[in-house]
Image (cartoon, helix red, strand yellow):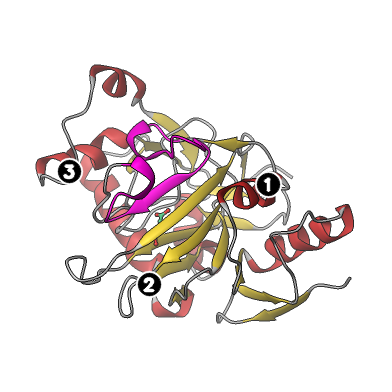
Amino acid sequence: MTLSVTRIGKTFVGEVAGIDLSKPLDADTVQQIKQAWWDHSILVFRDQDLTQEQHVAFSQNFGELQGHTVKDWLLPTHPEILVLSNRGRGGVKPLENGGAYWHSDITYEAVPPMGSILHGLTVPPEGGDTLYADMYAAYEALDDQTKALVDDAVAIHNYKHRYMLMAEGGKRPDPTEQQLAEWVDVEHPVVLRHPDSGRKALFVNEGFTVSIKGLGKDESNALLARLYEHSVRPDFVYAHAWRPHDIVMWDNRCTMHSATPYDAESYERTMHRTTIKGTPFQHQAAA
Ligand code: SIN
């Protein structure tokens, strides 16, 4: 079969029609999905009422899956699935405001994931969209002076800063000794070269990037603030309004995302996410 993909964002995001993700996929179809993923960075599939097993099986077409440093959010029956639910479904702790800030997933690890696949099980009738930013477009729109400044720069990422902000706001329990020991600084290029598309993408995010290596605190903060503001200009952003059983898969190396508010007292929002392991980054300068 030939995959039908329609561009629905300004610079990225493809909606894929005519495919049932609950069924095993042949190698040719998987290859077409991969190519569409590299071409559009984000793929949207509507009306895919997948079981947990089917969600995991579909995700495994793209690589090995990984869990999360906070084990409380992993589904006990399928620890490859991270549950983002304000009602704490499946024996998992409720997660208020999970991912409601601009970030790429798990960039605080030495090898961040290549992508994530989110299944909207129960979605509120209004609000609770997910915003996505195109980090290729953000990089390409930088002026030459800023490109020269960031092209060879290295950033430090760490989860501790973000977690403590949420813990201090009462949104997370105090971290355990083990978590604190795991959350060490890691380094990533500020601009990476995508291993499949060959394009350059900006790779800093408000969630987990803490500084630019070699710059003083004020200079680093000012540059990061400027890059964050630039990256989420409306031209580079797609807002996904969820319908039940949408599947959205994003390439974590060239996009950021942020969940948006909704009335969590009145409505349930339950999402299941699988996360696909990545490979070490190439610096943008590498061929
Ligand atoms: C996430 O940050 O992975 C989840 C985003 C969402 O819940 O919309």
Element type where label 2 sits in the image: loop
| Residue 232, above or below 159 | below
Q: Earlier in the sequence, mark 1 or mark 3?
A: 1
Q: Is residue 135 left or right of residue 172?
A: right
The residues colored magenta run 68-92
Classify residue 214 by image quadrant: top left
Nearer the observer, 56 or 3: 56
Query: Residue 150 appears at what percent x and percent y?
Result: 47, 51
Can the viewer see residue 31? yes
Closest to the observer: 253 or 126? 126
Query: Residue at label 3?
Result: 165
Residue 18 drawn above or below residue 224: below
Q: CA distance from mark 1 to mark 3?
A: 35 Å
Task: Give the crowd class for mark 3: few <14, some 14-19, many >=20 residues within 10 Å.
Answer: few
Helix or strand or loop: what does disc 1 sit on? helix
**Residue 163 pos. (x, y %):** 24, 39
Q: Quadrant of residue 185?
A: top left
- Of the pair 73 and 205, the residue shown nearer to us: 73
Residue beneath label 1, please? 57
Residue 211 drawn in magenta = no
Quadrant holding the C terminus: top right
Labels 3 and 2: the sequence-earlier one: 2
- Residue 129 is marked as 2
Instruction: Say which of marks 1 and 3 sits in front.
Output: 1
Secondary structure of the residue carrying tag 3 is helix
Left or right: 120 in relation to 26: left
Q: Is residue 143 visible?
A: no
At label 2, the amino acid type is Asp
Q: How far apart, in angstroms, are the residues tagged by discs 3 and 2?
A: 23 Å
The disc placed on residue 117 is none
Amino acid type, residue under disc 1 in the picture? Ala
Q: CA distance from mark 2 to mark 1?
A: 26 Å
